Image (cartoon, rainbow, N blue to C red):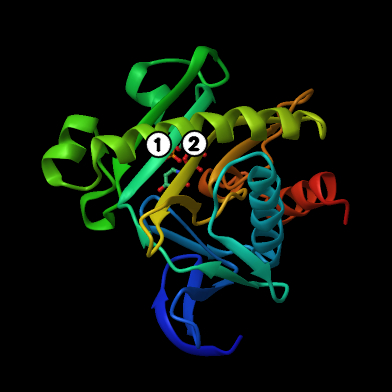
Amino acid sequence: MEKLEQLYEGKAKKVYATNDPDFVIVDYKDDATAFNGEKKGTIVGKGVINNRLTNHFMKMLEENGIPTHFVKEISDRETVVKKVKIIMLEVIVRNIAAGSFSKRFGVKEGVILKQPSIEFSLKNDDLGDPLINTSHVLALGLASAEDIAKIKEYAFKVNALLKNYLLKFDIELVDFKLEFGKTSDGKIVLADEISPDTCRFWDVHTHEKLDKDRFRRNLGGEEHAYQEMLKRVIGD
Ligand code: UDP
C-alpha cells in the first residue's frame, strides 16, 4: 500500500490517503494538548506508544466481537485503517468518578460508580465539545436511533472487555473516550484511538495516574507513565 498526500492533521495524529480509496494511514505525533488546545506540549515517545497500544487493544476487541477500523500496523507510528466517516460524537464511558464528571455532579474523584455510565459530547472544538443528549443527536441528524443503539451497545462491551483485560496488568480503567465511524458499506465500527491520551488508567494498588492527566494537571512524569503502560500491557 502506498502512502499518498496528507488529508488531515489533528492534534495528535495526521491522516494520509493511500492508493486504495477504502484505506487511509494514520501517523501518531508526540504533540500533546489539553483543555481544548489551550495547553500545548510534547510527550516524547507518545506517538509510538499510542500507536502500539491502540492497535493492541483494537486487535483484542476485534477478537471479542467489536468491529474496528484497524487493518495493519506498518511502522512504529503508522497504521493502515479503514476509511470511515466519523460520527461527530465523543462517546465517554465511566467506571469511577473523575474529571468533568466529578466537577459537574460534585462527586469526589475515585468514587466507584454504581454502574458504568455513558455520555456523548459533540465533537466540535470551537464549541468546547458540549455535552449532548440523544434527542439532540437525533434532532441534529448526527446519527440515527439505530446507530445510537449500536454505539451504546459497543461502548459498554468495550468497557467490559477492556476493564477485565487491564486488571490482569494491575490497571484500573477509570473512564475513556471512544469515537465511531461508518464504513462505505454503512457499517458502524470503532475508530480513532484507545490510549493514555483518551483513557484514564490508574494503578490498582497505589492509584498512581498512568495517563494524560499527568500532563493536564502538571504532575510530571508523563513520559514514564506512557512507557509504564506500554511495558505492562505489551511487555517492552
Ligand atoms: N477525553 C478525551 N478527549 C476529550 C475529552 C475527554 O479523550 O476531548 C477522555 C479523557 O481522557 C477521559 C474521559 O474522556 O479519559 C473523560 O474525560 P472528562 O469528561 O472527565 O474530561 P476532562 O476532565 O479530561 O476534561
> Considering only vertical position in the picture, is 153 above or below 222?
above
Which residue corresponds to the image point at 50% horizontal and 75% vertical from the top-left? 24
Looking at the rendering, in which quadrant would you find the C terminus?
bottom right
Kindly identify the amino acid type of the residue bearing the numbered disc 1: Lys
How many numbered dots are placed on residues in this image? 2
Secondary structure of the residue carrying tag 2 is helix
- Residue 145 visible in the displayed image: yes
- The residue closer to the viewer here, 230 or 117, is 117
- The residue closer to the viewer here, 235 or 186, is 186
> Considering only vertical position in the picture, is 130 above or below 25?
above
> Which quadrant of the figure has residue 29?
bottom right
Q: Residue furthest right?
A: 235
> Considering only vertical position in the picture, is 207 above or below 114?
below
Which residue in the protein does label 2 denote? 154
Residue 66 image position (x, y, % from top left): 57, 43
Q: Residue furthest front?
A: 185
Which residue in the protein does label 1 denote? 150
Classify residue 113 as left or right of residue 39. Answer: right
Ligand 1 image-quadrant field: top left
Which residue corresponds to the image point at 58% horizontal and 49% vertical from the top-left? 194
> Considering only vertical position in the picture, is 46 above or below 105?
below
- The residue closer to the viewer here, 229 or 182, is 182
Circles 1 and 2: CB atoms closer than 8 Å = yes
- Residue 221 visible in the displayed image: no
Secondary structure of the residue carrying tag 1 is helix
Q: Residue furthest left?
A: 139
Kindly identify the amino acid type of the residue bearing the numbered disc 2: Tyr
Residue 94 image position (x, y, % from top left): 50, 27
Residue 210 image position (x, y, % from top left): 69, 41
